[in-house]
Amino acid sequence: MPIAYVLVPPGSTAKTLAGEFARYLSIPITTRMTTAQITAAVCHTYTAAGANSR
């Protein structure tokens, strides 16, 4: 199972956390993207790479 290590400051939002995963995966994001959009892009990238829960 792949492991991603991201740093987020205390008090970060879910959007900040999702954005850090996107940055780790080199997924371009904009400030206008919602948390759900960023999370979907991150999950899609992990799924496409074969990183599923099995």
Image: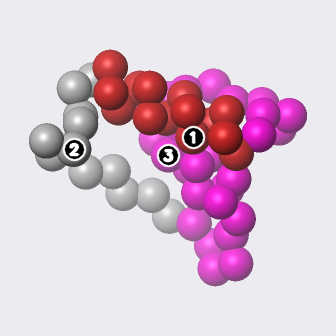
- Magenta segment range? 8-34
14 is higher (above) or lower (below) than 52: below
Front one among 47 and 2: 47
Type of colouring: secondary structure
Q: Please give the residue where the numbered disc 1 appears in the rendered image.
A: 39
Res. 32 image quadrant? top right
Q: Position of residue 7 (x, y in %)?
A: 50, 64
Q: Which residue is mark 2?
A: 53
Residues packed near mark 3 inside 10 Å, few (<14), some (14 to 19) or many (20 plus)? many
| Residue 9 picture location, percent across and down | 63, 73
Tell me which numbered mark, 3 or 1, is placed earlier along the sequence: 3
Residue positioned 22% across, 26% down in the render? 50
Q: In this rendering, would 2 be left or right of 23?
A: left
Q: Which amino acid type is marked by label 2?
A: Ser
| Farthest-out residue, front | 54
The CA distance from mark 3 to mark 1 is: 9 Å
Using the image, tell me which numbered label, if any, was put on residue 21: 3
